[in-house]
Image (spheres, coloured by chain):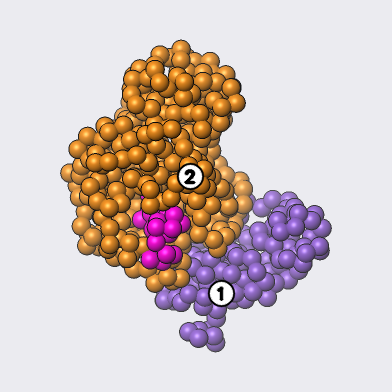
Amino acid sequence: MKDFENVSLPGPTVTPISQPFWESLKRGVFTLQRCNSCEEWIFYPRAHCPHCFSESLRWEEASGGGRLKTWSIVHRPGNPAWNHLAPYAVGVVELDEGPSILSHILADTHDYNYLQRVRLNILTPGEQPLPFFEIHEQEERI
Amino acid sequence: MNAAIVGVGELTPVRYSEGKTTLSLISESVIAALQDAGLEKTDIDGLLVGPQVGETPQHVPATVSEYLGIEPVMSNTVDLGGASGPGMIWRAAAAIQMGMCETVVCVLANKNEKGEVLKSPNRNPIREFDVPFGASGANTSYALLKRLHMEQYGSRQEDFAEIAYRARENAQLNPKAIFHGKPNTVEEILQSPMIADPLHLLEIVMPVAGGAAVIVTSEKKATTANHKPVFLKGAGEKITHRAISQAPDTLPFSYSIPKALQQANLKAEDMDLLSLYDCYTSVVATQLESAGLCEPGKFGDFLRNYSFAPDGEYPLNTHGGQLGFGQADLAGGMSHVVEAVLQLRGEAEGRQIPEVTNALVTGNGATLSETNALILGGTP
């Protein structure tokens, strides 16, 4: 697995709306917003629920489990800061709570399956811990 | 609709522009379109332009108007990425129909200098939630979409490569195309380097410098123009997301193409030319499926059954598409409009479709989010 220590990568551009998401990750907790009106889970953080337009939201810890909906093995990164880590994988993870998130997919080999189970693995490449995902070994290739 | 296209001006794409600015390419494109239409500078009373990363990010219509030396009474920036060109055409028609103006110039151009990388200073969700994970730029997003198509439908690399092969075969008939004289075999495309797996280098458009302007005017004024007018018969447009993780599970173009066909009271099979936005091979596949020309996932069979050449069953991107013509940033999207106009006027020299009455033109921006479609016809 690639070494993410001592690397300089562009971190998130945190906003007042998203700050609780990034702050929780610093405590090792993966939280998402949830709507108090329609109970849908929301990603990325917003000031309102995009499903029902309610402005009453709460933060709730998510399971960290999901399925790999699609992936790409990046050979020529769009941002040169990633060059020395290429080839690496990014993917879209459909979280068990409903929303989809784009993330870095950690694996020793880039051999993935459609809708394969993945789970959260919080890594800290720079200042800010990031919600990366890895293949969930126990449920691999079902 | 009460509007028609009466002039097109398209610069020959070059890999790198020297001694040019985006504004200078805009004026070259506009003057070429006016000459084509047989109109004067004083005829222009409307202006639609695109955003310009690096050179003029804000106040684009004012900057372009001042540079050109015009004072339009209707102007705007159309910010729909590769869908900006087709998006301008129906907006121009709508403004003409409302009586805001009579003759609109729609223009997109882009310089491309060696070693220069222009970056938009985004501080929005796609910057916050995509970039930190290693996903920057369009290649990764389109690779994710292509992988999803392959997994959901079992579509094959050979079939995607065939799309790029055919675009560059058509480019051999167009001396302006950047790939003219440089055909690719399917094997060469499959052997080209992986940029973002499953996308090969030769499945991706080549960035070039260039520009295109299209003049839209009232049907009344169109009758006095140099050429046979090309009529706007239908349009459809929809926006669904920005970041790829937020894309809906619906077929892209499943609203915009049927909507445009419905407005024109025509079917996809009635189209004599498919001028489909092709920044990547997979984008053509998804449009054939969205248009109902084949079942979802079955574009490979469609390719095996039908030819895309000008004299084939389904002439598709006869100018070479952007995959063969080159992509001058946002102006690449306008190349599909320009080709449809040339074909409908019977002026597509060396690649003219024998009988052509109707054309489907599409645009796409923000990774199959900003999708639109136009039906252009030789008769109202």
Tell me the magenta residue range: B278-298
Residue located 56% across and 74% down the image: A67
Which of the pair A125/A38 is nearer the observer? A38
Q: x, y percentage for residue B49?
A: 49, 30
Q: Quadrant of residue B216?
A: top left
Read off the residue under disc 2: B265
Chain A tint in image: purple
Answer left or right for B216 relative to A11.
Answer: left
Read off the residue under disc 1: A67
Residue located 40% across and 21% down the image: B223
Task: Quote the CA–CA distance across marks 1 and 2.
Answer: 42 Å
Residue located 19% across and 47% down the image: B182
| Residue B214 position (above or below residue B135) | above
Q: x, y percentage for residue B172?
A: 20, 44
Which of the pair B128/B36 is nearer the observer? B36
Chain of residue at mark 1: A
Answer left or right for B66 relative to B153.
Answer: right
Quadrant position of the C terminus of chain B in the picture? top left
Specify few, some or many for label 2: CA neighbours under 10 Å numbering under 14, 14-19, or 20 or more: few
Chain in orange (letter): B
| Residue B312 position (above or below residue B49) | below
